Image (tube, coloured by chain):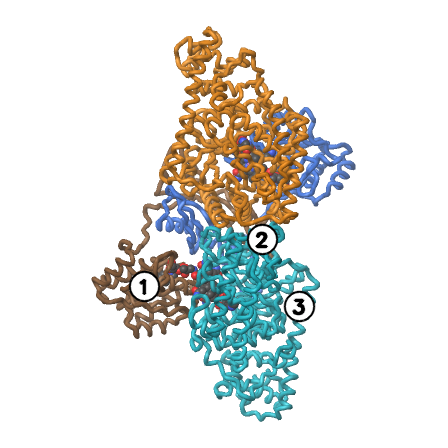
Chain colours: A cyan, B orange, C blue, D brown
Amino acid sequence: MSHETDSKLGLDPAAVASCRVAADAIATDIDGFVRRHTTVAVERTVTRLLGVDGVDADAVPLPNVLVDRLQAAGRLGEGVARPLVAAVAATGREPREVAEAVSAGELDLLAVPEPGEAELRQLGARLAQQAVDRVAANRAERARLQAEMQTHPDPLLYVIVATGNIYEDAVQGVTAAEEGADVIAVIRSTGQSLLDYVPFGATTEGFGGTYATQENFRIMRRALDEASARNGRYAMLCNYCSGLCMPEIAAMGALERLDMMLNDALYGILFRDINPQRTLVDQYFSRMINAWAGVIINTGEDNYLTTDDAIEATHTVLASQFINEALAARCGLVPAQMGLGHAMEMDPMAKDGFLMELAQAQLVRECFPEHRLKYMPPTKYMTGDIFRGLIQDALFNLVGVWTRQGIQLLGMHTEAMHTPHMADRAIAIESAKYVMNNARSLADEVEFKPGGLIRRRAASTVAATVELLTEVRDLGLFEALAQGRFAAVKRSPTGGRGLDGVAERAPDYYNPIEDALRASLRLEA
Amino acid sequence: MSHETDSKLGLDPAAVASCRVAADAIATDIDGFVRRHTTVAVERTVTRLLGVDGVDADAVPLPNVLVDRLQAAGRLGEGVARPLVAAVAATGREPREVAEAVSAGELDLLAVPEPGEAELRQLGARLAQQAVDRVAANRAERARLQAEMQTHPDPLLYVIVATGNIYEDAVQGVTAAEEGADVIAVIRSTGQSLLDYVPFGATTEGFGGTYATQENFRIMRRALDEASARNGRYAMLCNYCSGLCMPEIAAMGALERLDMMLNDALYGILFRDINPQRTLVDQYFSRMINAWAGVIINTGEDNYLTTDDAIEATHTVLASQFINEALAARCGLVPAQMGLGHAMEMDPMAKDGFLMELAQAQLVRECFPEHRLKYMPPTKYMTGDIFRGLIQDALFNLVGVWTRQGIQLLGMHTEAMHTPHMADRAIAIESAKYVMNNARSLADEVEFKPGGLIRRRAASTVAATVELLTEVRDLGLFEALAQGRFAAVKRSPTGGRGLDGVAERAPDYYNPIEDALRASLRLEA
Amino acid sequence: MSITGRTGATPPDPTRVRPYGDTLDDGQVQLSFSLPLPYSPEATEAARLLVKKMGMLDPRVYHAKDLGHGYTFFIVYARCAASVDATQIVVPKIEGDRMSKKEVDALIAERIGRPLVILGATTGTDAHTVGIDAILNMKGFDGEKGLESYHGFETHNLGAQVANEDLVAKAVELRADALLVSQVVTQKDSHKITLGQLIDMLEAEGLRQRMVVVCGGPRISHELALELGYDAGFGPGTRANDVGAFVARQVIERGLA
Amino acid sequence: MSITGRTGATPPDPTRVRPYGDTLDDGQVQLSFSLPLPYSPEATEAARLLVKKMGMLDPRVYHAKDLGHGYTFFIVYARCAASVDATQIVVPKIEGDRMSKKEVDALIAERIGRPLVILGATTGTDAHTVGIDAILNMKGFDGEKGLESYHGFETHNLGAQVANEDLVAKAVELRADALLVSQVVTQKDSHKITLGQLIDMLEAEGLRQRMVVVCGGPRISHELALELGYDAGFGPGTRANDVGAFVARQVIERGLA
Ligand code: B12
Ligand code: B12
Ligand SMILES: Cc1ncc(COP(=O)(O)O)c(C=O)c1O
Ligand SMILES: Cc1ncc(COP(=O)(O)O)c(C=O)c1O
């Protein structure tokens, strides 16, 4: 696709190739770092996938109870699997029962005698395989349902529900699915990404969203499955797999058959001030889980254009997408699972802004031809003028279908005021369907004049991207973030939240889930 | 422009040329007919341009008083100028005073002795020249004002005001001009086109519009001139020069410096059931006046797609535009004064409808490269869903700027419910400005794939147009209308309203205004 | 007004229906309007106060746009405190199951035995014919052929701008079984005036009870038609078969043929 | 309500302001909302009745859309019978003429003689920084540089998600002359809660009167800020110079420096 003759933009394939080379070097560097570390979240995820769930009397989730104990003893670097599997071996109980016993004070997790290494690893591998198989079964179930039902041509229509009450979310999600949405994303309560634990149970009073809890996932999945069956179209469920509990949420999603996850360490670093080391380690494990679960991940580069200028800084988005692609590939995600994010965020009053947006969207499409690109609507320049907003979103939908994006996040005309009301969403879905059907074949019909504004804009963005990626490769990603290369935000590798949850892996670090995933995904051990 | 290399659609210049040849033959035929006839409206127009205005005690306009007298005596075919000028010569009064005297019963118009033919013609010519000069002065005044003020790139933004109360119309027009409208069109009360006289004075209670009266023209012109001066942009004033008083309204418009006029006999025939002979004769004279006044005329082919199907019947629009072009040219109108009408009226639910609309709009643009095309927004498929409607109009605005239309009639999201409220219009203007600025250079940037849907659609429309025009040429326009070739409506040459106001010109028919206009416009006598 | 939201899969209460934004009973309503006040903080406050006067809670003016010349446009969201009891609502409707063209023709053939004469027109100064054509003409509407294509009807479409007198005269001349009148222009209630006049004329001539008289148009409801003295009213999206079925049934029920 | 319209160039009456569609005092208002009722004529009637309960005349439901699952969306136009007296409206406003960056700097240099220490943050769990950055950072907003670029200010931007305690501690540490707090998320009135807490904490520490405390955000008005105990509030479109001018003047007026 990046080949001259295929490119509508006349892109230079060599320039695109050098982006990939630089991004790969950046990812290799991160990969080395990640493999030497673990985090409290990674370890809690291991407990979850081994079957631990529930909360203690103080509402502390059992995965936290176990891992906090480990960390308090300064033994986080060994991994929680070692003592947990040992306890299972010693007591003959299920991991969940072990956790309950620990939380009840009946069992000291760290005082259990370990069986021999071979026996421990055999038991660990068996337990891990159960988890991996359960996730595989969900994946197969999804495939079965999707095969039975109708599919919608790309771009998929993606909408959010964000009432703060999961029962309302379910009602809203079901109506959206009925109206034609392909993906229902449940927005999280504002504070969750900074919590170093996953809340438990159904949410009825969140702020701007509900918590990502396993129960909430279940309620939504059930509601959408029923709606899918009624509509004959499979409604995908999406949630947020980012923040301090990134891999735990990936695990919960894998267990409850979520189909899509926002999953991007860079988002957390830049927009939530989460510590870069912590979240990059977390991301690695979360993405392996997502890869195995068949989840499509969405990355957050679209957000860069809210703090930086969309006309000046588009190359930062493209550069970050190349980095995210390289990082994701190392976790076993295939291009069709990579919802690399970008956005239409230029000032709508810009002369010829529509042409520039078209150039950008087509450029991203051509750089990532097999990826399920996630395309974000205007948000920053949405105002209280809902009538103008509707048109901004219509132009966005036109660009989306014209450049064949993969996932179209539907813009809401009420973006500047509230998270979407039921009718806002219905209006958005109806307009997207209208515009996309009415202009369905535009991509086949239209060519961009050689030497024109659109091609020139694409070429200059690629050139700037090569330059930025080369620089980031030379600096290293951590230093590049510290210097504010992305989103006009500076984040130090030792700043932000969650660094205290990171530990260097001990020589005898043991993580049977990671081992099983690497084997299943055929990743380098 | 119809040359292969210049055409974005790869149009066949020979096909376009044969459309013009056929249309010219059709116009020649009509021309012959028109030159042999006059109508009550034409004669009333002569009196108006000679200075007759006002109403009698029964509110009958003085032009009607004079012409009715003539017609009652079976002498319409001689023209009103002969007795009127004779009366001026005999009494030494102004034509207006003569009319007042006739109306008061003090003078019998038909009993005045005629001076010698030479004297009559000399006096007639002098009086006519005064009228022609007064119109020329208005034209010069417009040119002066426009030169002083800013101009807006095409498409011009055209909006309607339609309150039924001229004082509200003025308020609405002024706000529209302030918001950026280039043309303010004042809609007429529903019944006016069927009236065989022009109402007098200011309207405060019309239905769906105000009457086209000279006083209303004056009130609006004054309000807009003031607004223009404040805004530094010249606001054009438009009204409806059609129906049974077509040429009279042209005269009133010329006297009050209107800038644009809806002026199309075919509209009256097809949509108002006005007699074809009557209105084609009226149209001829009205267009000469408009030509001399520097008025841009708008034709009504856009309406065809309200009674016929836009996907099936577009070629009827194009064919009619060629006919209208040929007819208009014979009256001295230059391409820049020809606002040939067409419309975006396909079912918005049609797959790839946007592409077809694009093809049509570009086709019309290329067939009439120097004309100020009038492009009508979606109306028929506008519904009570104002949110969808806004988007229909946004796509229309995008097509308008992309294909460089001349006059963009702004769509209203409230089209299906009421004539525009002040805010509806403001929203429409703001969105048009937004979309057109944001996509200003699209026409320069984009090419249509050879052999693609867009080019094929254009080619097949041209082919169908050639066929239809050939058929109409063979049938003659009157017979073609009778057979329902346009707008899926059949109109017989002897049906409809107003035939009784048509008379064959007598051998001594005299019309000094026509003579003066022909001379000024350098038209064949 | 207590804003609750659901704590489970609570269904809404139909006896107390309020607008729904994203939480049960939140009452969310979007409004927009212009005020004849110059763009200013005071105008915005006036907009807010006005919405309060409508009995709304928490009005928030999200957008104010200067329309120029002393006018300002507002977009407001607010919460409606009022509710309606939906269980008490009764809307008059045309009775009888839907029938297809074939069924209508069969009914007429069987029960009447001759084609019914139908006269259609858009009356007054209204020039809109698309609606009446959609019902009467061969071509029809929405894939459904018009009454002209039925064996059971002999249709006469007089077109638009037809004076009520001319319509009545024609009805007498053709011994019409049914009159179908379209009204599209509704400004200053012109449709109600024109429609009302026709009924008055028919009654004066003693014709009203001898034929089926129905009207239609984008702003016509069955309820309004009944108020105006018509047998039925047909609004947006009407298709010919429903009109045909109504006319045939009426003629049979009322023994008019 | 008498619908009059103009008979000449009649101006609107500011003591009795009503919405304006296309005729003076026509009261035209557009509404849209959803009801938890299945798409049906009865639901449409419920929508109409509800708008009547708002005190509106002639409600016309122009569009009803099935949202599925027992919900319906409506677009309604109606005429508002209520009016407001615009001559009685008083909106609190920040006083003083606008000043440029240069003028603000000059005022501080002349009347205070040292840079004022300004501390900015978005508080609570709110992660939106674009607004506060627009006021504080070099880059600024809408072509107007931020307070960081002023000689008269020493600015500290703590970013977002800052706990009120941390903000107060930092204020003490840096001996701040002014606190600038941003709140963007307003769901469930979270902005009011977070803003209210800060004032309580400052009062408890006896700091409130010793500094200028202002807030801003898309849903903040000067009036709301005063209610919450702030010295001023700045809404959408605010530019740095206005904030700078306000802070400088307050410090001088209240003799805080
Ligand atoms: C097409 C059209 C025209 C065409 C009409 C061509 C023609 N021969 O019909 C033209 C361009 C000529 C025209 C002119 C004008 N129009 Co016009 N027009 C429209 C438009 C765009 C569509 C109407 C339409 O065809 N709808 C499609 C048909 C199929 O729908 P329908 O009429 O509702 O019919 C269905 C049902 O209602 C029902 N039905 C209808 N009649 C009947 C009768 C019976 C017996 C039955 C059983 C059922 C039935 O069945 C039909 C099929 O389902 C509307 C805007 C809109 N989008 O609605 C404006 C509109 C109706 N027009 C309007 C106006 C004001 C005018 C003018 C007066 C403007 C002017 N001053 O120049 C003129 C003059 C015409 C006049 N005196 O009446 C206004 C009316 C405002 C109002 N509420 O009063 C509208 C709403 C536009 C606007 N916003 O200003 N118009
Ligand atoms: C950009 C943005 C983001 C970015 C923020 C990046 C960043 N670092 O700031 C990202 C993508 C991270 C984001 C995330 C979220 N966002 Co957000 N976001 C927006 C968006 C699109 C634009 C806001 C903006 O930057 N405006 C531009 C600035 C310049 O305007 P401003 O803030 O009003 O500032 C001006 C004035 O108000 C004033 N001002 C502001 N602060 C101050 C302070 C002082 C002292 C003074 C004097 C003046 C002042 O001066 C500024 C310049 O004039 C809005 C939608 C919209 N169009 O408004 C949603 C919006 C604010 N976000 C929203 C939500 C819900 C979220 C999330 C919670 C969603 C979720 N659950 O995932 C998350 C989490 C964030 C959190 N916990 O706070 C909602 C809030 C709904 C509500 N009313 O409560 C909105 C309205 C979108 C929506 N409709 O759902 N968001
Ligand atoms: C990749 C990614 N993760 C997460 C989020 C938001 O999640 P939160 O703010 O709840 O962490 C976003 C929001 O846009 C995102 O793009
Ligand atoms: C050319 C032309 N003349 C006149 C009119 C309408 O005028 P009226 O119905 O008042 O004759 C139209 C309406 O669209 C038109 O296109």
Which quadrant of the figure contains the N terminus of chain D?
A: top left
Badge nearest the viewer, 2 or 1? 1
Closest to the observer: A461 or B236? A461
Q: Is mark 1 within 8 Å of ligand 2?
A: no
The kind of residue on which mark 3 rests is Arg
Which residue is labeled 2 in the image?
A430
Residue B360: image quadrant is top right
Q: Are marks 1 and 3 on the same chain?
A: no
Q: Is residue D103 visible?
A: yes
The kind of residue on which mark 1 rests is Ser
Badge nearest the viewer, 1 or 3? 1
Q: Is residue A70 above or below residue A224?
A: below
Q: Left or right of B35: which side holds B233?
A: left
Closest to the observer: D166 or A225? D166
* Chain of the residue under label 2: A
Q: Is residue B273 above or below residue A238?
A: above
* Chain of the residue under label 1: D
* Chain of the residue under label 3: A
What number is the disc on residue C223? none
Q: Residue at the spot x=48%, y=80% of the render?
A: A501
Mark 1 Cα-neighbour bin, 10 Å: few <14, some 14–19, many ≥20: some
What number is the disc on residue D149? 1
Which residue is labeled 3 in the image?
A142
